[in-house]
Amino acid sequence: MSFNIKKYLIYFFWFAIVLSGPITILRNSNSLTFSDPIALLNFFQRLFGMLAFSLLFMQIILGSFLDFWLRVLGAKAYRLHTQQGLFSYALILIHPIIFSLINLKIWGILAFLASFLPGKDLFLNFGKMAFLFLTIGIAAAYFRTKPFFRRNFIKFHYLNYLAFFFVRIHAGGLGSDVKIFPFSFVFNLAPIAVSIIILYKHAFLNLKKNISQTSIN
């Protein structure tokens, strides 16, 4: 397989995963969605949430094997990793803001303010915790050159994995589109793939490294 074909295949799978959300939400919507203001807000809330999940999944794949992607895609891989990370974080930020606006329109100002605080809904709290972890991860990446963040960067990086699984639980408990194809395929595949990545990167490779060091000694 030629180098260019490999690149085109990578781009194809990237677009397929990212577009699975918009295609699904259009399949799960009707004309009334675009005529009612609250339904329209909910449409964009769902859309941004699904896009955020897909991009967060792609961020883990890209960031965990960045050296490989740099060899395949060149400097574009690093730019994609940076830009995709910022864009996915923006979507994750907008998603709960839209939810709060819906609360404001339906229930008033008190419900709007309360939506930013931890509440009784377990799945909402998982989403809020995921947002907190991702915010810490973004801050750690931004200040990576600072001694404290450089020393503990791997620990902060683990928060991205935890945030991903929290987002998955949040969406699985509250999402109305996660069981609809094609997004359902990505939604079910992603946690399996991320779990394999974690085992490979942070268990198998560390074990292999320790065995090699023991053999040398």
Image (cartoon, rainbow, N blue to C red):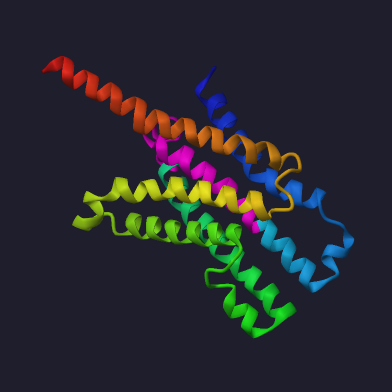
| Image spot of residue 122 (x, y percent) | 58, 59
Residue occupying the point 17% across, 21% down: 213
Residue furthest to the right in view is 31
Residue occupying the point 54% across, 17% down: 1
Residue stretch in magenta: 48-76
Q: Is 25 or 173 nearer to us in this picture?
A: 173
Q: Main secondary structure of the magenta part?
A: helix
Residue occupying the point 64% across, 41% down: 187
Left or right, 97 with reference to 102 = left
Residue occupying the point 21% across, 57% down: 148
Left or right, 182 with reference to 91 = right
In this rendering, the answer to whether 154 lies above or below 39 is above
Residue furthest to the bottom in view is 109
Residue furthest to the front in view is 120
Left or right, 81 with reference to 5 = left
Q: Is 182 or 142 nearer to us in this picture?
A: 182
Q: Quadrant of residue 98?
A: bottom right
Q: Quadrant of residue 75?
A: top left
Q: Quadrant of residue 199?
A: top left
Left or right, 180 with reference to 17 = right
Q: Is residue 61 magenta?
A: yes
Quadrant of the drawing holding the C terminus: top left
| Image spot of residue 33 (x, y percent) | 83, 63
| Image spot of residue 43 (x, y percent) | 74, 61
